[in-house]
Image: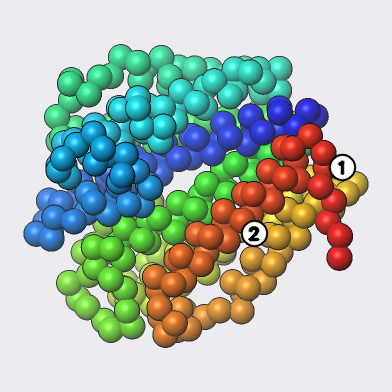
């Protein structure tokens, strides 16, 4: 496979996962804003999506409706949901011979329907429905990939895009909650509602209760979102799947990449931690460290597969 083809498959899936992530963040902020009087949930989303400076360059104040428009519709914001869907379609369009008709139909129809939506034709109260639609279309695309794509190197590169973006996303989700109500090993009953919203937005509330019981605590939730490998949106689950697909590629090409070695090191480091150690050493430090590690992992995937030369691991 050409390295440019691999890169487009990888980025197509990163962009659609990013669109879903942004829709979930918007949903979290909207629901928290209905009951919270802290008024910092919209700033936290801009920080988590790394577009606060871009937003403030265009807008003098952080305003709910303006943030919604900027993150959903604004074409000058490269990470807006509308742009992410467009970039997904454009990347897949350039490698049409590598994807199935079912995959293309989902992407193309989502793009076409989104063109009919404009920022001036919606109310803030409609944001949950718009976000739900994006999440549904993202799930349809994932289903089409799983059920129709060959289990080849194309499939592995597409899933690498999903899981690298998802690993980054879960850190951003936790960071939003941590920004609004900082996590610590001190229990705070006022946080239960916000944690419940976060888990529901991740479609993980019922799964959390099945795994840990009805009583919520910050320690249990942190373990569920970071370490629980049965949770498809946990950090550990995403990193494990990155390692699996990198291992598949190593086997497919009969060469071990630097990216595979990097993924093993990150997982090994995470496996040595406990929730209590994270609280003791500082939650912000943990989030910053693993955000950096994921960026390093992405860079290693780029140098291993997308530079035109296969980068072999050397001890």
Around disc 1, counting alpha carbons within 10 Å, would you say few (fewer than 14), some (14 to 19), or many (20 or more)? few
Disc on res. 253: 1
Residue at x 22% of width, y 24% of height: 119
Residue at x 52% of width, y 30% of height: 141
Examine the rendered structure and indicate whether residue 84 appears above or below residue 259: above
Residue 155 appears anywhere in the view: no
Examine the rendered structure and indicate whether residue 109 appears above or below residue 238: above
* Residue that carries the numbered disc 2 in the rendered image: 240
In the image, taking residue 294 as reference, residue 137 lies left or right, namely left
Residue 172 appears anywhere in the view: yes
Around disc 2, counting alpha carbons within 10 Å, would you say few (fewer than 14), some (14 to 19), or many (20 or more)? some
Say what secondary structure mark 1 lies in: helix
Residue 187: % across, % down: 26, 81
Residue at x 61% of width, y 79% of height: 272
Q: Earlier in the sequence, mark 1 or mark 2?
A: 2
Classify the position of the C terminus by image quarter: bottom right
Q: Examine the image and state in which quarter residue 149 appears.
A: top right
Between the residue at mark 1 and the residue at mark 2, the CA separation in whole angstroms equals 20 Å
Classify the position of the N terminus by image quarter: top right
Say what secondary structure mark 2 lies in: helix
In the image, taking residue 308 as reference, residue 242 lies left or right, namely left
Of the residues tagged 1 and 2, which is closer to the observer? Answer: 1
């Amino acid at each position: 496979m050409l390295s440019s083809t691999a890169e487009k498959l990888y980025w197509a899936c990163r962009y659609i996962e990013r669109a879903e992530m942004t829709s979930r963040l918007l949903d979290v902020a909207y629901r928290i804003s209905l009951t919270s009087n802290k008024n910092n949930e919209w700033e936290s989303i801009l920080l988590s999506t790394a577009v606060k400076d871009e937003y403030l360059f265009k807008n003098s104040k952080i305003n709910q409706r303006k943030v919604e428009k900027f993150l959903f519709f604004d074409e000058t914001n490269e990470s807006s949901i509308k742009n992410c869907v467009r970039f997904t379609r454009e990347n897949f369009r350039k490698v049409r011979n590598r994807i199935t008709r079912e995959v293309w139909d989902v992407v193309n129809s989502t793009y076409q329907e989104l063109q009919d939506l404009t920022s001036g034709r919606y109310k803030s109260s409609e944001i949950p429905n718009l976000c739900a639609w994006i999440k549904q279309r993202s799930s349809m695309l994932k289903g089409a990939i799983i059920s129709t794509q060959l289990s080849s190197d194309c499939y592995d590169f597409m899933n690498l895009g999903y899981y690298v973006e998802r690993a980054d996303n879960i850190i951003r989700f936790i960071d939003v909650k941590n920004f609004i109500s900082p996590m610590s090993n001190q229990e705070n009953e006022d946080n239960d509602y916000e944690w419940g919203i976060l888990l529901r937005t991740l479609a993980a509330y019922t799964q959390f209760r099945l795994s840990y019981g009805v009583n919520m605590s910050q320690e249990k939730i942190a373990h569920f979102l970071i370490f629980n490998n049965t949770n498809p949106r946990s950090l550990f689950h995403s990193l494990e799947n990155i390692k699996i697909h990198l291992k598949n590629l190593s086997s497919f090409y009969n060469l071990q990449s630097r990216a595979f070695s990097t993924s093993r090191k990150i997982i090994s480091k995470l496996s040595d931690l406990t929730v209590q150690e994270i609280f003791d050493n500082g939650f912000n430090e943990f989030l910053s460290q693993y955000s950096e590690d994921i960026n390093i992992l992405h860079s290693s995937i780029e140098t291993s597969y997308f530079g035109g030369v296969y980068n072999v691991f050397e001890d």
